[in-house]
Amino acid sequence: MEIRDLQYVTELARWRSFTKAAEALHITQPTLSKMIRNLESELGVDLFVRVGKRVEVTDAGALICEQGQMILQAFASLDRELKDMTGLHKGSIRIGLPPMAGSSFFAGVMSRFRARYPGLAIQMVEDGARRIEKEVTLGRLDMGVTVLPTDEEEFSVHSIIERRLKLIVHPQHRLAGRTEVALLELEHEPFILFREDFALHDIIIDECERAGFQPNVMYESSQWDFIRELVAANLGVALLPETICESLDPAHVAQVHLVDPVIPWHLAMIWRRDTYLSHAARAWISFVKNSFGENGEIRET
């Protein structure tokens, strides 16, 4: 068994599809199928079984994935350390960003970082905060931006920005003329939320339950601008960070301050505590720390 075999097994287990796994590995599906068959023959066990159109992992496959992930992480760490000896003249950093954080705060920061370190490439993955946390844990991302709270035993955490959520409603909604509204007043409203892999999904549901009701979730999306359009179509209400709300057209949606409770939107940069960080990754962390002031304002560095 070789490192390449472990990569094939873990990717197939991740995607549960020969087609998607082959695309992720940049090989053909027949090549992947042949490599898996050869490995199963070599080991004398089945690693995967087909169930309908899906591929399921056997107990033997799960064992290899569990042990193989640690081996792949160690191999990747060794590879980064060796490449790190060349300094900051070349290399790459893998960063996860939630859509709202990227569009609101990080475009300018990345531009200035690139100007300072032109030899470094940034591989940016845009996804929900909870998915980003998982990818950082698995070593597929060097670091990411998430919404607090998070697991501070698993991650090193650096606070970046703290804002709060605001209510957005249709301009003709009964609450549109209010300056503030308590969360409990939304008990009978249809909610438009982010998907489950976004931290705000669970945060909003948990706060509603603490207020004494289960929210009536009508729509879920991964895009804040689509959520805005659904509200503008009078299909429900939504809670968005006030930074996003600043850019909304009042002719399409109305904004109302949310009180009782005030729900924070607290962004932080995370990276694994138990992993090696290249000089490039450490340079990015230092650059981000210097780019944001104590109140979350973006500074020129």
Image (cartoon, helix red, strand yellow):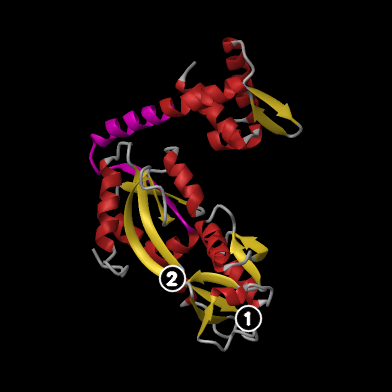
Q: Name the image quarter holding residue 269.
A: bottom left
Helix, strand or loop at disc 1?
loop
Q: How many numbered marks have been drawn onto this rendered protein structure?
A: 2
Give the percent coordinates (x, y) of residue 115.
Answer: 28, 57
In magenta stretch: residue 227: no
Q: Name the image quarter holding residue 51.
A: top right
Q: Identify the residue shown where x is 63% and y is 77%.
A: 232
Q: Name the image quarter holding residue 72.
A: top left
Left or right of 243: which side holds 157?
Answer: left
Viewer can see residue 117: no
Q: Which residue is mark 2?
A: 164
Q: Identify the residue shown where x is 39% and y is 60%.
A: 267
Q: Identify the residue shown where x is 46% and y is 68%.
A: 263
Give the percent coordinates (x, y) of residue 97.
Answer: 44, 55
In the rendered image, the quadrant that contains the C terminus is: bottom left
Helix, strand or loop at disc 2?
strand
Which one is nearer the viewer's eye here, 264 or 209? Answer: 209
Give the percent coordinates (x, y) of residue 198.
Answer: 53, 56
Viewer can see residue 110: yes
Residue closest to the far right: 52
Left or right of 108: which side holds 18?
Answer: right
Report the disc number at residue 170.
1
Which span is picked out in magenta? 72-98
Along the polypeptide, which appears first: circle 2 or circle 1? Answer: 2
Which one is nearer the viewer's eye here, 124 or 285? Answer: 285
Query: Label 2 sits on what residue type?
Result: Arg
Q: Is residue 56 above or below residue 107?
A: above
* Distance of label 2 from label 1 (alpha carbons): 20 Å
